[in-house]
Image: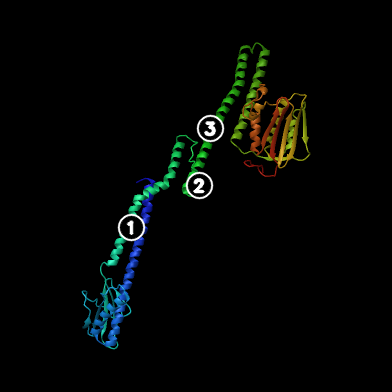
Amino acid sequence: MHTLRWRLTLWYGGMAAAILILLAAILYLNARASLLDVREADVKDTADSASQILKETGSPDSAVGDIRRRDVRTVWAIGEVRRQDVQVVIRNANGKVLAETAGDEEPPGINPSDAAYPEVWWDGRYLATTFSSEEVPGVTGEVYAVLPAWDPTLRRLLLIEVIAVSGALALMVGFGPKLAERALRPLKSVSTVAGELRRGRLESRVNLPDLKSRRDEVGEVASSFDAMAESLESLFEAERESKETLRRFVADASHELRTPLTSVLGYLDVLEESGDTDPTVRHRALKAIREEGGRMACLVEDLLVLARLDAKREMSVELVDLFALVREAADNYPGRRIELVSNGLDVPVLAAPEALRWVVSNLISNAVKHTPPEKRIVVSVDREGREAVLRVADEGTGIPEDALPHVFERFYQAESSRTGEGSGLGLSIARETVEALEGRIEVESAPGEGSTFTVRLPLSEKLPVKGISAKS
């Protein structure tokens, strides 16, 4: 009885039963009112006929006798089914009965003031009225009908209603659960898929086109459930990828830190053994420790930058002249052939100056590192539509084709670039910084022909970048 189909059956069956009982009661009361109207009409017609005969003949006996015969003729003439148990009593001024019809019930004894024709008095058992005749002074007629405790017509109607309501309830109880089960059958598919999801089968779907095409609550539930399952699968997949990325990040960071730390510990052992006796060894060991310490410091700083980017912390942004920033970064390499190209137009962008400066410096530094001194590096700043475009093109060693999809991954270093310098985080930081500024970074390269890194940022419209707060 706790299942949904039984609850639905009882709920709707109870509502239907209440409606049926209400309709049956209304029908019964209307039928009873109609019968009362008929009986009231009988009383009025009889009173009218008796008063008319009394007026015409002046004889109470004739009025009582003729009205009975007239009623019989009228019934046979018009074919009405009207009960002839209306009683007539005619009294004189002293209340003595002058004439009356034969009846088992005593007259109600009403006063003319209670109901004078055509008014009809009703006390629950009697319908009665009175009349008087000007031609026969002092004579008063009483016309009444006695209502039975159970009218046969009403009794039959009530019996029919009880049988109809009982039959309807029986049908509801018998077929209601089956109909409810059929209506709820699609939800079993949803329940089955929910169980599979609970057991970890995130790819499970309701996947019933005929069910989803239904334009009712069940169809909405099926569609919403599949959408929820897809969202859950995406969330769990994203979580797995996040955990895997974090695991690789920790492993790579540990590996990158372990190498310089091992070197520092090794040089400390050398200092302990020979540092006091050999100044050359001491100098070489201290220099190496300083270099490895600087390498670890750079790596830790890069990791902190990545952590801030991962946390999506807000950066204070302001209008930056992209070409001026590029020229400043290129001036740090006076001995290299770095050519700056511009169309002479201002290229303002809304960005965090230090973050954007780091991106430009990193791209130029990579180009310098992988390009022979005699080769040139071309850095161009231009407008393309609503974008500011920065390109850093070199004539260096290039990037192998199989390495191109991975150059922006954290700690990734192509085999051709593993010179012991760098941590493999620079391009990853550059990409995430550019994306935080609502831009994008691309690379084109061919081994032996050089590489071109392209940064695209939205031109400034003096509006804060989404997710980044501007300086006031």
Image mark count: 3
Q: Which mark is residue 213?
A: 2
Q: Nearer the viewer, mark 3 or mark 1?
A: 1
Q: Secondary structure at mark 1?
A: helix
The percent coordinates of residue 149 (x first, y second) are 25, 68
Q: Measure the alpha-carbon separation of dots 2 and 3.
A: 33 Å
Q: Which residue sits at x=75%, y=34%?
A: 380
Q: Nearer the viewer, mark 2 or mark 3?
A: 2
Q: Measure the alpha-carbon separation of dots 1 and 2.
A: 37 Å
Q: Measure the alpha-carbon separation of dots 3 and 1.
A: 61 Å
Q: Nearer the viewer, residue 130 or 82?
A: 82
Write down the quadrant of residue 419 in the picture: top right
Q: Residue furthest top?
A: 277
Among numbered discs 3 and 1, the one appearing first in the sequence: 1
The percent coordinates of residue 433 (x first, y second) are 65, 35
The percent coordinates of residue 205 (x first, y second) are 49, 39
Q: Secondary structure at mark 2?
A: loop
**Which residue matches tag 1?**
165
Is any atom of residue 222 visible in this view? yes
Write down the quadrant of residue 70 in the picture: bottom left
Among numbered discs 1 and 2, the one appearing first in the sequence: 1
Q: Nearer the viewer, residue 114 or 144?
A: 144
Label 2 environment density (alpha carbons within 10 Å; few <14, some 14–19, many ≥20): few
**Which residue matches tag 3?**
240
Q: Is residue 192 above or below residue 446?
A: below
Label 1 environment density (alpha carbons within 10 Å; few <14, some 14–19, many ≥20): some
